[in-house]
Image: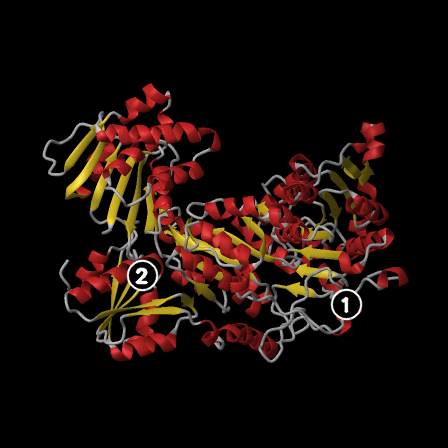
Amino acid sequence: MKKLEIRLSGSGGQGVILAAIILANAGVEQGLNAIQTQSYGPEARGGASKAEVILSNDEINYPKITRANILLSLTQKAYDKYNSSLETNGILIVDESVKLSGDETFKVYTLPILRTAQEKFETQLVANIISLGAIYELMGEGIIDKDIMIRSITERVPAHTVQKNTDAFEEGIKLARG
Amino acid sequence: MNKEGYKLVQGNEACVEGALAAGMRFFAGYPITPSTEIAEISAEKLPALGGRFIQMEDELASMAAIIGGSLAGKKTMTATSGPGFSLMQENIGYAAITEIPCVVVNVQRGGPSTGLPTSPAQGEVMQAKWGTHGDHPAIALTPNSVQETFEYTVKAFNLAEKYRTPVIFLMDETVGHMREKMAFKDASEIEIIDRKKPTCKPEDYVAYRPDEDMIPPMAPFGEGYRYHVSGLTHDETGFPTNNNEISEKLVRRLVDKVDKNIDDFSYYEEYKLEDAEIVIIAYGGVSRSAKSAVDDLRKQNIKAGLFRPITIWPFLEKQVNKVSLNAKEIYVAEMNLGQYVLEVERIACKNCTVKSINKVNGELITPEEIVKAIGGNK
Amino acid sequence: MNCNETTKKYYRANKLPHIWCPGCGHGTLTNTIVRAVDKLGLNKDEVVIVSGIGCSSRAPGYLDFNTLHTTHGRALAFATGIKFANPKLHVIVIMGDGDSSAIGGNHLIHASRRNIDITAVVFNNNIYGMTGGQFSPTTPFGDLATTTPYGNIDKSFNLCSLAQGAGATYVGRGTAYHAPLMQKLIENGIQNKGFSFIEGLSLCPTYYGRRNKKGSAFKMHTFLKENCVDKKVVDKDPEKGKNKIIIGEFYNNPQPEYTESYQVIIDKLQG
């Protein structure tokens, strides 16, 4: 595979960093080079939050994203801030609540991520894993095996939430398939 | 863990794993971003190994506690970031003059003062050497990957034990918070050095009389070697003295035991230096950008290479001098307004041009910025 | 220094004479520690004496134990590291008034709060003697020092109340005049499994005494003799405590000790 750069953005507490860790972890388990970084404000909740994952067969030096191949934005603020960092033919995944600027050149997936979390799972806490399912579905086949992804989720979420989260992951895949 | 034995690990976590592998069994610290995970993971893992974790009331106390713990026979560590590192300077000097081994991790963030708590910087390069008052020995290592964080934390402990001196493990937020693959090593693959203990009878023990290697054997408190430890300038017995000759001898020995053994721990990486006319010198997180920049410049037929010090103190004079003899230009890229470059200039400016690439906005210097500064196409 | 055959074996004779001024109370107070250690029959190899900086901090150098002369105010933090790393050791900390309550005040509060098994002994001479007589947190209101040339307007600390309030489980006050009491308090403090705080009122005829016209060292000792009343007496008759300095055992309330509580965690995890 060529280098794949994925940026996940939202607000602090939405769990985008955990989703990025799960993805990078699965990348390593798959035998790829993977690197995960994040930037966030000093507060634990509410501020802008951004996490990045780079997956590659080759050694990864510069650990940050230059041009994202995939951008997830769960909030308007995150979309406004990061949409210009998406490469021309990249993939944008946004929550349906986000208003797009209208001049997108990239492929856009507007998905009811936050609503699905609330309606189907009765908690916003799984929005990150629904998003992860969507990213997984759209990042391309054959990069990471699905069972490795499921295992990575299982290892990294609290034990009593494993079922809910793996269900959320499947839900995310379904949403992206449309 | 994947088939090749790799796991996704965070830099700060790798630091703890390395410390535990090296034999760290005592950690004292005070929470501060972006180093806090090191304390948290130590708190979780130490007691199961019979080790001890204590959260002290501040960084002054943390530094004091790890010196006390080391004197009682344990391998000890603390971890902090800029503001806490400033507070630790007082007792880093104490550890230096009393020759008590310990490891001080500083995960650098934006400064000065409270600065940018969650952003990377490299503003404490000079502080790692000159932070505490008076002439003193300084060893500082700086890793640029998660794997290296593990391996060089082990080395930091080994050097502290071998040379009986505090060792600064100078990380930055980029490396501390980044997650990437790391191979866990089997204990049998790791070289561990323990402090030299006295072999003489307690009544014959002269606590600060150095062996030929300039290092006195160290007895832990409680094992029958009753002696005196003081931060005052002392003679070989450890007791205070104002004698000018003895004072001079002590300070020189403290510095020499490290500086004169630099060949023992000159760690660095050279990348595409063989024919390089343009040499980038970078360390820590920035060196990863520099490596990418070298590749980009090579694609543009610019003969670029990278020299990356891992041993940041003492300064690698010999290696930098050699690099400067073959280079036309040296660019020192660092996330400060020019610290390491001062040392590079001291050695290299008689042989080639030395320029500085600096950034203090809280973001890692990018490969593009380095390429552009050197005159390549973005 | 009053060394008889019993106490002699605890001193590093070749490091004497000491640096303290004639009439200073620190020698007597040091001796009360030595006598307490002797009385309890502690193994010299297992005793650690830690000090900070100041006149009091020179005491460990004269004593034949494991001795550590640290930085100003930090003695308790070093001692915490030693005790926590090797709980077998008996750790005694000698501090001055400025050392323990100004620059080291935070460490005193937190060592008390943790109830770690350390015996802290403060040689309180109401002044910074080593630097030539500046006021300390225990210099009485109105008194003179080189940095209070017009009288001290700081209120002075009650160190025992401070330690007790912060969580010390054994607290008492003795003086350089009331040496047997001081020794007894230290013995009890060492035996208390937890943080013990013993204040020893010392005297500084050179700086505090001279500047405040307190007379000779003899007169200053006499002052301690005549103006200190034991808490037991005052408990029976509060009138007797009026305008006096209260000495004696103030608090003795054993609580779970820090290193023992941590050992419970280790044992649990190691199965």
Residue sitting at x 75%, y 47%: C200
Q: Amino acid at mark 2?
A: Ser
A112, above or below C176, in the image: above
- Category of crowding for the residue at label 1, using alpha-carbon neighbours closer than 10 angstroms: few (below 14), some (14–19), many (at least 20): few
Provide the chain ID for the residue under circle 2.
B
User: In the rendered image, which residue does mark 1 sit on?
Assistant: C17
Residue B8 makes an appearance in the image: yes
Q: Which residue is mark 2?
A: B287
| Residue farthest toward the right in the current orientation of the protein | C5
C53 vs C246, left or right, is: left
Q: Is residue C142 visible?
A: no
x and y percentages locating residue B98 in the rendered image: 60, 65
Q: Does the residue at mark 2 contact the one at mark 1 (Cβ under 8 Å)?
A: no
User: Considering depth in this image, is B311 or B87 the residue closer to the camera?
Assistant: B311
Quarter of the view holding residue C181: top right
Give the left or right position of residue C245, taking residue A162 as reference.
right
Q: In the figure, residue A7 lies in which quadrant? A: top left
Chain letter for mark 1: C
Q: Is residue A160 above or below residue B348?
A: above
Q: CA distance from mark 2 to mark 1?
A: 58 Å
Disc marking residue C213: none
Return the x and y of residue A103 as percentages of the image width and height: 9, 34
Residue B251 picture quarter: bottom right
Classify mark 1: helix, strand or loop: loop
- Please state which amino acid type lies under the numbered disc 1: Pro
Asked which colour scheme the image uses, the reply is secondary structure
A64 shown above or below B187: above
